[in-house]
Amino acid sequence: SGSSIAGQNLTRNFGVVRESRFYPDATGQTSSPGTYTFAHWYRPGSLGQVTLSLDPPNPRYTYQVRVDENCDGTFGPGEEWAPFPYTFSVGSTWPREPDGSLRACAVEVRALVPAGEPMGATDIVLVKAELAWANRPGVVEPDTLTDTLQVAGGEVRLEKRVRNVTQNTPFATTGQGRPGEVLEYCIAYRNLGTQGVNAFVLTDPVPYFTDPLLSVADYGGKAIRWTHGGNTLYLTAASGDDAGEVTGSVVRVQVGAVGPGEMGEVCYRVRVR
């Protein structure tokens, strides 16, 4: 109470630090057997210890991680592939930007797919980065991203882009939005091989901090815009009535056959919580 502290000098230490960022979400495809490497960035907001882990901890495939801890653009000695969970330090020697903030350094996640996996098999993992603050280990700052891997025949390449519809920004590999703003994600696919791919299914997780829009005016009141070749279709979020669906926070489109050189794109929109 006020009377109990009257006449006393109290000392309180506090500080303001930047928010840590772990980005972007990524989607990829590989053969069986095969490997795929997801490229990410981690920008710590404060000094401390960072632990990288997977959720679920035992996904369908084996995953490894490596961190460019000196931000020199290469993965040198001491920065080799390691299993999850993986812990590294953000100390006083961590590289900084000209304004004094801690620099974003590269983080790569590699998936190892064994032989015998069926085409279209999909694995979705949540990669967590938890920063325990220096001198305050009880304070843990979490951040997450999602990696989606799909087994495919042929050589189908995926490219994911995002734009802020509310702010009318151009498409880029990463994007930001304030609560209430609308983001649009588009995943382009193209068969670079000389053989056709059959029964191709494109799957993408809805970012955990957003809610999918199930009726978009620009999509004819539907949830998904799918372009294949010269044709554009608008698909509902419901399962079973057309080639698309949005269920369990996952966008899925049954693309089907993709011939050599053929390409297409799947787009959907979300609102930031």
Image (tube, rainbow, N blue to C red):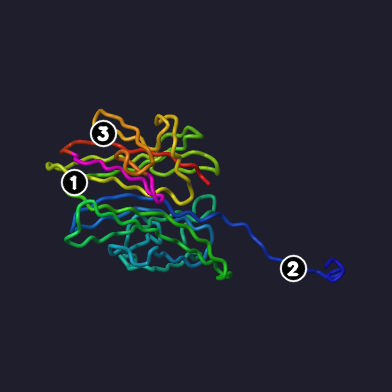
Residue 155 marker? 1
Q: Position of residue 55 (x, y in %)?
A: 40, 63
Q: CA distance from mark 2 to mark 3?
A: 65 Å
Q: Position of residue 177 (x, y in %)?
A: 51, 42
Residue 252 marker? none
Q: CB atoms at circles 3 and 1 under 8 Å apart? A: no
Point 32% across, 67% down: residue: 82
| Amino acid at circle 2 | Thr
Foreground residue among 173 and 224: 224
Residue on which disc 3 sits = 228
Q: CA distance from mark 1 to mark 2?
A: 63 Å
Q: 10 Å neighbourhood of mark 2: few (<14), some, or many (≥20)?
A: few
Q: Residue furthest left?
A: 194
User: Secondary structure beneath disc 1?
Assistant: loop
| Amino acid at circle 3 | His
Q: Quadrant where the N terminus lies?
A: bottom right
Residue 11 marker? 2
Magenta stretch in the rendered image: 246-258
Pair 3/1: label in front: 3
**As drawn, is 135 to the left or to the right of 7?**
left
